[in-house]
Image: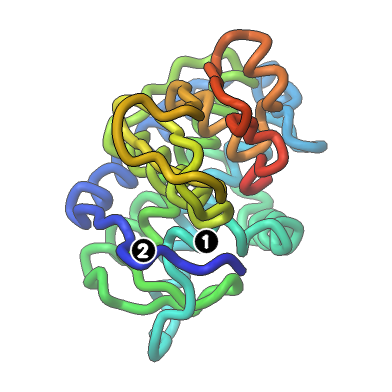
């Protein structure tokens, strides 16, 4: 595991809670309007249909409530910025757990139940509560930041697969972008490349000569959604470059060997 940042980014817990709740509500309203043909479309994520993807998003909220119903852990083992590196090995287990939890109920019922359970659980628990998780115990405050990643990424998946235009909360998009950018800096520490994702994040990464003033010699710049798709394996580096969704200048400004951060 790469070393954690010495000074991890701080997130406003009130804004993060509001963003997670609002984003889940956006998805829930859209899912209730999906027709049979849309639900059976491929999601672009393995063998999942759009219906499977929508059910998984409901599980994100449902499992948060279930985690808060368990006895708390003593101390956190994992920070938000380390979370992306811990998820890949558990993807199959998480998918299976979601299927077992949600099988059989109509999607509107799943969303109504999950939204209610999440709201009740969040109201009853402070951010310092430590959840027992498969990936490693985390504070609720840190875990909620990771929920912005799950919700933003899967909202984007759902929009593309079902032809929707579900809005993405600005605060959720900002937190998701920043967490994945910080994780890149953890994975490849250094100061030779500056990665810019306006208006939300700027990080330096990759070993080599450190930039101190003026225009950096190695710069990567892209928009938040392109960055999120790169970091999660939805878009390949070469594809994003060819489409001019990424601008990369300098001999070290090639992130292809570092991406995706999670998939």
Residue 47's tag is none
Q: Quadrant of the C terminus?
A: top right
Which secondary structure, mark 1? Answer: helix
Q: Nearer the viewer, residue 45 or 28?
A: 45
- Image spot of residue 48 (x, y percent): 75, 37
Q: Quadrant of residue 128?
A: bottom left
Residue 170 drawn above or below residue 82: above
- Image spot of residue 64 (x, y percent): 44, 62
Looking at the image, which residue is at 53% across and 74% down?
A: 133
Label pair 1/2, CB-CB below 8 angstroms = yes
Residue 142's tag is 2
Residue 146 drawn above or below residue 125: above
- Image spot of residue 119 (x, y percent): 29, 56
The residue at which mark 1 appears reads as: 83
Which secondary structure, mark 2? Answer: helix
Looking at the image, which residue is at 69% across and 57% down?
A: 88
Q: Quadrant of the N terminus?
A: bottom right
- Lateral position of residue 48 relative to residue 170, left or right: right
Residue 210 in sight: yes
List the single residue furthest toward the top: 243
Q: Earlier in the sequence, mark 1 or mark 2?
A: 1
Residue 192 drawn above or below residue 59: above
Label 2 environment density (alpha carbons within 10 Å; few <14, some 14–19, many ≥20) = many
- Lateral position of residue 236 relative to residue 105, left or right: right
Looking at the image, which residue is at 46% across and 41% down?
A: 151
Q: Quadrant of residue 144?
A: bottom left
**How far apart in space, not on screen, are marks 1 and 2 (Cα)?**
9 Å
Residue 111 in sight: no
Looking at the image, which residue is at 26% across and 52% down?
A: 17
Label 1 environment density (alpha carbons within 10 Å; few <14, some 14–19, many ≥20) = many
Residue 47 drawn above or below residue 132: above
- Lateral position of residue 188 relative to residue 42, left or right: left
């Amino acid at each position: 595991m790469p070393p954690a940042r010495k000074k991890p980014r701080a997130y406003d817990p009130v804004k993060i809670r509001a963003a997670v709740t609002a984003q889940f509500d956006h998805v829930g309203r859209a899912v209730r309007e999906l027709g049979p043909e849309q639900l059976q479309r491929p999601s672009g994520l393995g063998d999942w249909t759009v219906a499977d993807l929508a059910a998984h998003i409901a599980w994100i909220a449902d499992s948060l409530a279930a985690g808060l119903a368990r006895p708390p852990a003593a101390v956190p083992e994992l920070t938000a910025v380390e979370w992306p590196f811990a998820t890949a090995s558990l993807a199959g287990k998480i998918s299976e757990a979601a299927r077992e939890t949600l099988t059989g109920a109509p999607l509107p019922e799943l969303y109504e139940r999950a939204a209610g359970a999440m709201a009740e659980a969040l109201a009853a628990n402070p951010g310092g509560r430590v959840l027992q998780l498969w990936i490693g115990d985390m504070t609720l405050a840190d875990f909620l930041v990771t929920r912005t990643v799950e919700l933003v990424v899967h909202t984007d998946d759902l929009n593309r697969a079902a032809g929707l235009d579900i809005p993405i909360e600005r605060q959720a998009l900002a937190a998701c972008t920043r967490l994945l950018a910080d994780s890149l800096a953890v994975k490849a520490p250094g100061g030779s490349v500056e990665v810019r994702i306006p208006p939300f994040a700027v990080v330096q990464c990759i070993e080599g000569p450190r930039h101190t003033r003026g225009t950096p010699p190695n710069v990567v710049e892209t928009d938040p959604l392109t960055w999120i798709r790169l970091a999660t394996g939805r878009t390949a580096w070469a594809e994003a470059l060819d489409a001019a969704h990424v601008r990369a200048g300098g001999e070290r400004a090639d992130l292809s060997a570092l991406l995706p951060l999670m998939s």
